[in-house]
Image (spheres, grey):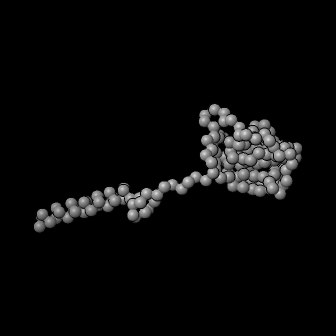
Amino acid sequence: MKLARSVVPTLVLSVAGLLAAAAVTADPHGDSRGDRHEAPASRGEVHPGPQGYQRVEPPKGWDARPQHADPHVYNHNFQAAKTYHIGAYRRPQGWVAHHWAYGETLPRLYWGPQFLISDYWLFALEVPPAGYEWVRDDTDALLINTVTGQILQVEYGVFG
């Protein structure tokens, strides 16, 4: 009787050990056959971005701005495909967060030099037409008319 009682805990520990080993070697994607799957190919081209303080060269044609902006082509609010972490954002003093959309007018304080996105290509933003600039508002990039402040296009979630 004593022998049977000492074998039972050993069997239980052995079975528990086998189950734990099976869980560790199981496919992380939950495939019970144990086949390994390659990660899906990334969409779009590789975008290296800046490395520390190294300045990335602008792409060819970055300054070839369209001379006329057809509002119907630009008037969209997009969700950014990728988020970039570039540092803290401080909105103009006395202003509160606002969810901007195309057609609205951005107050002048929001498009001062400290908010301009001059290296817009680093953040997968398109070339702005003449008379327009990309500006940052918190996590979003806004394409605005530099005379009136009217928002032509918005990319939500560009910055994290």
| Location of residue 19 by image quarter | bottom left
Q: Position of residue 107 (x, y in %)?
A: 83, 46
Does residue 14 lie above or below 60 as drawn?
below
Residue 142 vertical position relative to residue 4 in the rendered view, above or below: above
Q: Is residue 93 visible?
A: no
Q: How many marks?
A: 0
- Judged from this view, the residue extending furthest toward the bottom is 1
Q: Residue at x 84, y 54 (%)?
A: 71
Task: Work out whether residue 114 or residue 40 is closer to the camera in this orientation and state it.
Answer: 40
Q: Is residue 149 left or right of residue 27?
A: right
Residue occupying the point 60% across, 36% down: 51
Q: Nearer the viewer, residue 146 or 68?
A: 68
- Specify the farthest residue to the front: 60
Instruction: Please state the horizontal and vertical placement of residue 20, each as a whole percent of the image.
Output: 33, 58
Please provide percent x and percent y for residue 120.
Answer: 72, 42
Q: Which residue corresponds to the image point at 85% horizontal and 43% vertical from the top-left?
A: 131
Residue 27 in view of the camera: yes
Q: Which one is in front, 54 or 6?
A: 54
Question: Residue 90 in the image: x percent, y percent?
Answer: 71, 41
Q: Quadrant of residue 1?
A: bottom left
Rendered image quadrant of residue 14: bottom left
Residue at figure coordinates x 63%, y 44% from the top left: 47
Residue 50 appears left or right of 71: left
* Residue 139 horizontal side relative to residue 38, left or right: right
